[in-house]
Amino acid sequence: MKSLIIFVFLFGAGFCLNAQDSLVYRLGAQVIYHPYELFTGFQAERENGPHQHQVGLSVGASTTFFQQRFYPQFHYQYAYHLVKKRWLQTGPVARLSLSTLRFNKQSSHGRSFQEEVFLGAYVGTGNRSRFRLSAGIGPAVEQNWSASREKFVHSVSWNTFAEISWSYAL
Protein backbone atom coordinates (compact mmCIF):
# COMPACT_ATOMS: atom_id res chain seq x y z
CA MET A 1 0.00 0.00 0.00
CA LYS A 2 2.91 2.34 0.75
CA SER A 3 4.30 1.85 -2.75
CA LEU A 4 0.92 2.74 -4.29
CA ILE A 5 0.73 5.97 -2.27
CA ILE A 6 4.29 6.93 -3.24
CA PHE A 7 3.54 6.05 -6.86
CA VAL A 8 0.41 8.22 -6.94
CA PHE A 9 2.23 11.11 -5.25
CA LEU A 10 5.25 11.08 -7.58
CA PHE A 11 3.43 10.73 -10.88
CA GLY A 12 0.30 12.62 -9.89
CA ALA A 13 2.34 15.66 -8.83
CA GLY A 14 2.70 16.64 -12.49
CA PHE A 15 -1.02 17.32 -12.67
CA CYS A 16 -0.78 19.93 -9.93
CA LEU A 17 1.97 22.08 -11.45
CA ASN A 18 1.26 25.61 -12.69
CA ALA A 19 -0.20 25.65 -16.18
CA GLN A 20 1.97 26.86 -19.06
CA ASP A 21 1.07 27.75 -22.63
CA SER A 22 2.04 24.35 -24.06
CA LEU A 23 0.28 22.30 -21.38
CA VAL A 24 -2.95 20.53 -22.25
CA TYR A 25 -5.06 18.76 -19.64
CA ARG A 26 -7.59 16.11 -20.66
CA LEU A 27 -10.25 13.99 -18.98
CA GLY A 28 -11.70 10.90 -20.57
CA ALA A 29 -13.07 7.38 -20.49
CA GLN A 30 -11.37 4.12 -21.40
CA VAL A 31 -11.98 0.45 -22.08
CA ILE A 32 -8.96 -1.83 -21.58
CA TYR A 33 -8.85 -5.42 -22.76
CA HIS A 34 -6.63 -7.89 -20.92
CA PRO A 35 -6.75 -11.61 -21.77
CA TYR A 36 -8.32 -12.30 -18.35
CA GLU A 37 -10.60 -9.26 -17.89
CA LEU A 38 -12.21 -6.24 -19.52
CA PHE A 39 -11.59 -3.01 -17.55
CA THR A 40 -13.64 0.18 -17.86
CA GLY A 41 -12.85 3.48 -16.19
CA PHE A 42 -11.70 7.08 -16.29
CA GLN A 43 -8.41 8.78 -17.06
CA ALA A 44 -6.67 12.13 -16.66
CA GLU A 45 -3.92 13.27 -19.00
CA ARG A 46 -1.27 15.96 -18.99
CA GLU A 47 0.32 16.74 -22.34
CA ASN A 48 3.37 18.99 -22.68
CA GLY A 49 4.77 19.14 -26.20
CA PRO A 50 5.60 15.59 -27.31
CA HIS A 51 5.31 14.18 -23.75
CA GLN A 52 2.04 12.79 -22.46
CA HIS A 53 1.42 11.50 -18.93
CA GLN A 54 -1.77 9.66 -18.10
CA VAL A 55 -3.20 8.24 -14.88
CA GLY A 56 -6.33 6.16 -14.77
CA LEU A 57 -8.58 4.20 -12.49
CA SER A 58 -10.74 1.41 -13.83
CA VAL A 59 -12.61 -1.66 -12.61
CA GLY A 60 -12.83 -5.15 -14.01
CA ALA A 61 -16.26 -5.25 -15.59
CA SER A 62 -17.12 -8.95 -15.41
CA THR A 63 -15.59 -9.51 -11.96
CA THR A 64 -17.03 -6.36 -10.37
CA PHE A 65 -20.50 -6.34 -11.92
CA PHE A 66 -21.27 -10.02 -12.52
CA GLN A 67 -19.29 -11.78 -9.76
CA GLN A 68 -19.84 -8.99 -7.19
CA ARG A 69 -16.12 -8.76 -6.33
CA PHE A 70 -14.55 -5.30 -6.59
CA TYR A 71 -11.53 -5.48 -8.94
CA PRO A 72 -9.81 -2.07 -9.25
CA GLN A 73 -6.86 -1.26 -11.48
CA PHE A 74 -4.68 1.85 -11.30
CA HIS A 75 -2.33 2.72 -14.15
CA TYR A 76 0.25 5.28 -15.15
CA GLN A 77 1.11 5.66 -18.82
CA TYR A 78 3.79 7.68 -20.58
CA ALA A 79 3.57 8.31 -24.31
CA TYR A 80 5.89 10.17 -26.63
CA HIS A 81 4.42 11.71 -29.78
CA LEU A 82 6.67 10.77 -32.71
CA VAL A 83 4.04 12.19 -35.05
CA LYS A 84 1.87 14.99 -33.69
CA LYS A 85 -0.25 16.59 -36.37
CA ARG A 86 -3.54 18.33 -35.84
CA TRP A 87 -5.60 15.18 -36.55
CA LEU A 88 -3.04 12.38 -36.05
CA GLN A 89 -0.81 11.36 -33.16
CA THR A 90 1.30 8.21 -32.95
CA GLY A 91 4.31 6.90 -31.04
CA PRO A 92 5.59 4.52 -28.37
CA VAL A 93 3.93 4.04 -25.01
CA ALA A 94 5.09 2.66 -21.63
CA ARG A 95 2.50 1.60 -19.08
CA LEU A 96 2.56 0.48 -15.45
CA SER A 97 -0.60 -1.17 -14.05
CA LEU A 98 -1.38 -2.17 -10.47
CA SER A 99 -4.47 -4.18 -9.55
CA THR A 100 -5.80 -6.21 -6.66
CA LEU A 101 -8.61 -8.73 -6.33
CA ARG A 102 -10.10 -10.08 -3.11
CA PHE A 103 -11.17 -13.64 -3.83
CA ASN A 104 -11.74 -14.92 -0.29
CA LYS A 105 -13.59 -12.66 2.17
CA GLN A 106 -13.10 -15.05 5.13
CA SER A 107 -9.29 -14.94 4.96
CA SER A 108 -7.16 -11.89 5.68
CA HIS A 109 -4.78 -13.12 2.96
CA GLY A 110 -7.45 -13.80 0.34
CA ARG A 111 -6.10 -11.25 -2.14
CA SER A 112 -4.29 -11.40 -5.41
CA PHE A 113 -1.96 -8.54 -6.39
CA GLN A 114 -0.83 -7.90 -9.95
CA GLU A 115 1.87 -5.56 -11.20
CA GLU A 116 2.27 -5.23 -14.96
CA VAL A 117 4.70 -3.27 -17.15
CA PHE A 118 3.94 -2.85 -20.84
CA LEU A 119 5.74 -1.41 -23.85
CA GLY A 120 3.74 -0.76 -26.97
CA ALA A 121 2.45 1.79 -29.43
CA TYR A 122 -0.56 4.03 -29.89
CA VAL A 123 -2.37 5.91 -32.61
CA GLY A 124 -4.79 8.75 -31.94
CA THR A 125 -6.99 11.08 -33.91
CA GLY A 126 -8.56 14.39 -33.04
CA ASN A 127 -7.45 17.64 -31.55
CA ARG A 128 -9.72 18.87 -28.75
CA SER A 129 -11.75 15.64 -28.63
CA ARG A 130 -9.36 12.71 -29.07
CA PHE A 131 -10.01 9.05 -29.86
CA ARG A 132 -7.07 6.72 -29.21
CA LEU A 133 -6.05 3.06 -29.65
CA SER A 134 -3.12 1.60 -27.66
CA ALA A 135 -1.65 -1.88 -27.45
CA GLY A 136 1.35 -3.43 -25.72
CA ILE A 137 3.06 -6.46 -24.27
CA GLY A 138 5.13 -6.95 -21.14
CA PRO A 139 5.83 -8.94 -17.98
CA ALA A 140 3.25 -9.38 -15.24
CA VAL A 141 3.94 -10.38 -11.64
CA GLU A 142 1.10 -11.93 -9.68
CA GLN A 143 1.27 -12.41 -5.90
CA ASN A 144 -1.03 -14.86 -4.11
CA TRP A 145 -1.03 -16.09 -0.52
CA SER A 146 -0.05 -19.74 -0.19
CA ALA A 147 -1.67 -21.37 2.86
CA SER A 148 0.68 -24.36 2.70
CA ARG A 149 3.83 -22.22 2.55
CA GLU A 150 2.33 -19.46 4.73
CA LYS A 151 3.76 -16.69 2.55
CA PHE A 152 3.07 -14.83 -0.68
CA VAL A 153 4.01 -16.74 -3.81
CA HIS A 154 5.05 -14.82 -6.92
CA SER A 155 4.47 -15.92 -10.48
CA VAL A 156 5.81 -14.11 -13.54
CA SER A 157 4.21 -14.31 -16.98
CA TRP A 158 3.84 -12.27 -20.16
CA ASN A 159 0.67 -10.31 -20.69
CA THR A 160 -0.86 -8.05 -23.31
CA PHE A 161 -3.31 -5.18 -23.32
CA ALA A 162 -5.37 -3.26 -25.85
CA GLU A 163 -7.03 0.04 -24.97
CA ILE A 164 -9.66 2.21 -26.61
CA SER A 165 -10.00 5.63 -25.04
CA TRP A 166 -11.67 8.96 -25.60
CA SER A 167 -10.55 12.20 -23.97
CA TYR A 168 -11.49 15.86 -24.11
CA ALA A 169 -9.12 18.81 -23.61
CA LEU A 170 -10.10 21.14 -20.78
Image: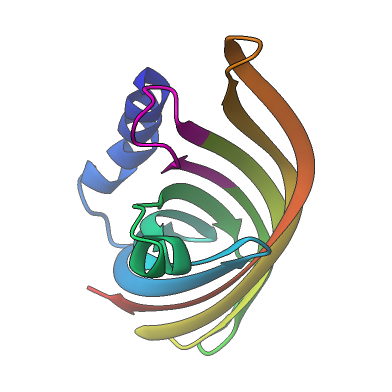
Give residue 22's position: percent from left, percent from top: 35, 62
- Whether 63 is drawn above or below 144: the answer is below
Give residue 138's position: percent from left, percent from top: 75, 47
In this view of the protein, can residue 83 be seen by the observer? no
Is residue 110 magenta-colored? yes
Task: Read off the magenta span.
Answer: 96-112
- Whether 85 is drawn above or below 60: the answer is below
Which residue is farthest top? Answer: 150
Give residue 105's position: percent from left, percent from top: 34, 36
The residue positioned 29% from the left and 75% from the top of the image is: 169
Q: Nearer the viewer, residue 4 or 19?
A: 4
Colour logic: rainbow
Q: Is 60 situated left or right of 37 in this image?
A: left
**The N terminus appears in which quarter of the rendering?**
top left
The residue positioned 45% from the left and 30% from the top of the image is: 110
Instruction: Using the rendered view, name the quadrant where residue 155 is placed.
Output: top right
Q: Nearer the viewer, residue 49 or 127?
A: 127
Instruction: Using the rendered view, name the quadrant where residue 100 is placed.
Output: top left
Q: Is 60 situated left or right of 144 in this image?
A: left
Q: Nearer the viewer, residue 150 or 155?
A: 150
- Whether 164 is drawn above or below 117: the answer is below
Give residue 57's position: percent from left, percent from top: 35, 55
